[in-house]
Amino acid sequence: MPEFTAADVKRLRDATGAGMMDCKRALTDADGDMDKAAELVRERTGAKMEGRVGDRTAGEGRVHAYLHAPSPGLPPKVGVLLELNCETDFVAKGDGFKQLANDIALHIAALRPAVVREDEVDDELLARERQFAEREARESGKPDHIVERIVEGKLKAFYKEKVLLNQPFVKDDSRTVGELVAEFQRTSGEKIEIGRFARFAVGR
């Protein structure tokens, strides 16, 4: 008998929107493998998506609002609006997608990313960061081949600090926000994208 829990069944149901028994049968037939079970659910419910995820358009989704109060009984001091996209309204209405949106918004409230992805970083800011890292390395007397490695390491750390998809997820720093989104994408079988976000803080 394959090993999976009631939580696994609920996770598959949240991601696919299928019935509880459909999810349980799929997990049984897939020997507990979540990705295979998700594919079986999509095939059996007629929701199988053709083609590569990267070639498809995430034209549906939701705008999620998250408010964070510093402690119980006090008014919220930080708020986030997040646009999270998927391919179908079917997935957008699922509990799993709503939870993903809330988790990402909570992360944004806590870690204050500047942009969603690396290509959105301002070119002038990136050039300044590169120049500063290079100057610092050269002033310490490092040879050229070491300087370049140091610069690349500093830029990687910069992206990790400022870019949402590169940041370690606040609720589980063993994976990045990008990996969190990719995991839900594999389970749901749909293209999932973070469109944009805005973070608001009282007095800042």
Image (cartoon, rainbow, N blue to C red):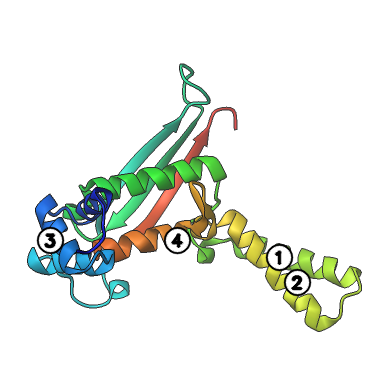
Mark 1 vs mark 3: in front: 3
Q: Left of 175 or right of it: where is 65?
A: left
Q: Which residue is mark 4?
A: 178
Rendered image: mark on residue 25: 3
* Secondary-structure class at tag 1: helix
Alpha carbon of mark 4 to alpha carbon of mark 2: how far? 24 Å
Residue placed at 21% from the left, 53% from the top? 9
Measured in 3D between alpha carbons, the distance from the residue under mark 1 to the one under mark 4, in whole angstroms, is: 20 Å
Say if mark 1 contacts mark 2, CB within 8 Å. yes
- Residue contact at pointers 4 and 2, CB within 8 angstroms: no
The Cα–Cα distance between marks 2 and 3, rounded to whole angstroms, is 52 Å
Q: Amino acid at mark 2?
A: Ile
The answer to whether the residues at label 3 and label 4 have Cβ atoms under 8 Å apart is no
Marks 1/3: CA–CA distance: 49 Å
Q: Position of residue 133 (x, y in %)?
A: 77, 66
Residue 112 screen position, x and y as percent: 55, 45
Counting residues from the N terminus, which is met first, the one under dot 3 or under dot 4? 3
Q: Quadrant of residue 149?
A: bottom right
